Amino acid sequence: MSLLSALPLLVAAVAMSTSLLLGRTAPRGWLVATLVGVAAALLAAAIVLMGGADWEWRSSFLLGGEPLHLRLDSLSAFFLVLLGVVGGAGSVYAREYWSDTAHPRSARTGRFWWSLMLFSLGFVLLASNGLHFLIAWELFTLSAYFLITLNRQCSAVQAAGWLYIGASHAATLALFAFFTLLAVHVGSWDLGPMQEHTELAPLFWLGLFGFGLKAGLFPLHIWLPSAHANAPSHVSAMLSGVTLKLGIYGLMRFSGWLPLPDGAGWVVAVLGVTSAVLGVAFALGQHDLKRLLAYHSVENIGIILIGLGFALVAVQQGNPVWGRLALAGALLHVWNHGLFKALLFFGAGSVLHATGTRMMSQLGGLWRAMPWTAGLFALGAVAISGLPPLNGFVSEWLVYLGLFDATLAHGPAAWLAISSAIFLGITGALALACFAKVCGVVFLGAPRSPAAAHAHESGPQMRSAMLVLGVACVAIGLAPVIFWPAVVRAMDVWNPVWVGAETPVALSALGLFHVALALVALTLAGWLWRRVQRSGLIRAVTWDCAYALPTARMQYTAGSFAGIITEWFAWILRPERYQQLPETCFPATAHHAEHTPETVLEKIVKPAAALVMRVSAWARSLQHGRLQAYLLYLLIGVAALALFVLLGGSP
Amino acid sequence: MIVMRDLMLRLVLWLLLAPLLPGIINKVKAWVAGRRGPPVLQLYYDLAKLWRKGVVMSNLASPGFIIGPAVAWVALIGAALLMPLGPAGSVVSFRGDVLLLIYLLALARFCTAWAAMETGSAFEGMGAAREVSYAVLTEAAIIAAVLSLIVHTGSVSLSTMLAPSAGAGAALLVAGLFTVLLAENCRVPFDDPNTHLELTMIHEVMVLDHSGPPLAAILHGASIKLLLFSILLVQAVLPMGDLSPLAAAGALAVGVLLVTVGVGLVESLLARFAFRRVPLLLTTAFLLCVFALLVAWKGDAP
């Protein structure tokens, strides 16, 4: 046990407990305690990731009848870093976004549940006992429910909360079965590598369902869009940036520790491709800014799963090197998606804060009032579209390289790799289309409503939270080599066979190219801007084919921008159109509205649930409280048994 | 030091030669139509003129309206510098640089679409929407083409990937990549660089509001992109690595000229397609590249 990381973890635990107590009464103290806790946890994780020994602690203290067993190895430290950065930024953001003046009652409870969520998330990452893992898992699921429903007067929020808690418990149920079966077979709740128990392989599928539902992979993502859209934005950032990754953490943790069934990697990779393409297709159909971002989480989880899936395929095929690259890409994308998605949700939160609406059809032209938010949102948009020189490209590049090398290996996985690479390319182009739409419709052009026209920039706390995440995105993009050792150490825990990889030369070359690109682009852009200003900049009305009175309503809308692509995906998006076409020579009214429902929820889950309800209602009619009928049931039952015995069945 | 000199030399070459291509295309079109046509150097004159002019900017536009074209231009030049040049090879080369090239083109696309959305004009929104939507199909085609080269040559970096000829699938690859070239460079039958009817355009309509130096950056960037795609096409097909340096340089020059003339001929002989047929044509290009991939796979399977 290494004392070096034990001390920061102790400080983190004490600080987080303090923040739990202070949340209701002393907001400033709460913020300080939370930040101290987060910083201490980050320090502990950094020590482990930078080459320190793993930290393990077995105590005789019993929790739920089981001795406490905590472990911080590189894989959990890797996720702990993400939790620390996003959690810390979110705490600062929340102070202004969900302030006591604006939300006198829910702000206090919000702080309590926020601290509890951070605490339990950290505990999930450290727990090395199945029972404690489940307790912490349930605790963070519940605290997330209370955070989602902070504004519970609103009926949409209530519905989202219900869906979230229902779906989460389906996942928890699967995990209950998972851990119980594990404990029964192994004979102890203690967790650790157990590759030798080959009979445990089928448990992978239970874990895939439970953790996959939490991670939001398609088609288990049904709870995700409404929960992320209706939660307060700092909570959305946390849900999307960190809690989804806990699902990935579970998948990685247990796919590394447990034996794998045949075909596990193939299934994960195919699910990843499906999530990536369909996630972004659904995102394109959305009109609600936060709902759109939520669907992009499905997409990015898909990209992570493609990497993880190929790593699993590689493990089953004798550990070729391409599996490493794919897994490195997946791991780095865990960080990257956490960072830029939290940044984007913070940006969306600032927009919501300033205008009071999430509907893109009501926004527009916000760059004038909110230059910081617009700039940082654009940074996040470039990063999430996987464009150089930011971090999203680095991790997608690693995944691509893994896929290319898998193709070159001419093995059985080559065809899967080829199709995955093509679909990954399509996903990237679709994400670019989607974020060109979001940035254009929300921040550029003319304001589409008075609310957008009178927007205001968010305050220093919200801005600084966004700035921190933006800087992190830039840092990983420009200097990926610095973060590579952390990725390698996390990989070593996952698969010790791959130990000791040197930094790929290409990665440093890529980093250098990124730096040069960023420097030249900034210099040239600045120079051109100055030149344009000096050479006499004239402002005039937008050229609309010589039409001199353009209005905000004449702009291209989010729906029309995405129209071409949503038409291609209409087979799965099933958009609902309400329209009144212009008729007669002088049409007085015409309108067109389009809405993309959550197809899996509306067309599959809800009908299935309705069927179950109908069957149950029918079965209930057997029970009506009439004694005569019950006596009849008894008689029929006895007669059936007698018949059974008479006909020669053995009782 | 030598690397820096090489880099500078290439930069100058790219910057100076690129605007020649649109001039050649226009000359070919004029020749087919029996006109005299504008001089081959017309784009140079236009660029010089635009560079000296002032800028008219929409009331709604932010500084991004100027920064977008600048960043797009840098991204395109960055992509160009990654491209190996026949006998000279490439100056920056690493595993996976081909992906960087593809995504730099995407960065340029994002910046152009951003600048288009700045104006709040429905026309430019329309153009940006078409550009980013059709790019989904061209990107799939490009990745399939790259995969076919990867499978054929067993390498994932541009300089070795483009050295041998494309083998048996070359004809398929030429057809596929040439279609992608036409689409990505807003040429007939996808787009018409001559028309001024905004409703029917893709790329041209996105730059309606631009003027002065930013427009010059856009036009120059477009010519670099055209040269980039022509060089990619020629090098993918010809066995650059097997020729002597002089022959390779000559082959590259003649090849690029042939592609340019080909674009001019297509433009003279075909009309622009209706928009509903654009995805069909792009899907065909994608399938051609996939077939080239299949041929490469069959040809190289151990």
Image (cartoon, coloured by chain):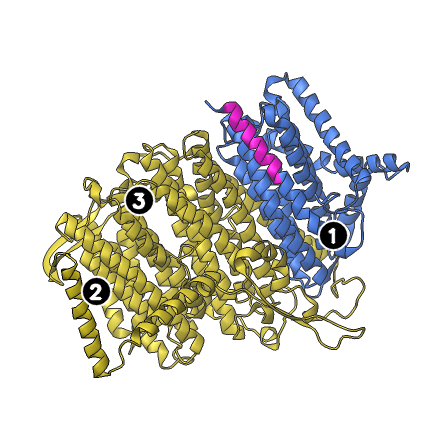
Chain colours: A yellow, B blue
Determine the chain carrying the residue at label 3: A
Looking at the image, residue B91 lies above or below residue A577: above
Residue designated by label 3: A490
Amino acid carrying label 1: it is Met
Looking at the image, residue A495 lies above or below residue A124: above
User: Dots 1 and 2: beta carbons under 8 Å?
Assistant: no
Q: Residue furthest left?
A: A60
Q: Answer whether residue B29 is magenta in the image.
A: no
Query: Relative to residue A51, is residue B136 drawn left or right?
Result: right
Of marks 3 and 1, the one in the foreground: 1
Distance from disc 1 to disc 2, alpha carbons, whole Å, reads: 63 Å
Q: Nearer the viewer, residue A73 or A38?
A: A73
Of marks 1 and 2, the one in the foreground: 1
Neighbor class of circle 2 (other Cα within 10 Å; few <14, some 14-19, many 20+) is some
User: Which percent across, then down, holds residue B240?
Assistant: 62, 22
- Which mark, residue B12? none
Give the residue drawn at x 42%, y 74%: A157
Residue designated by label 2: A14
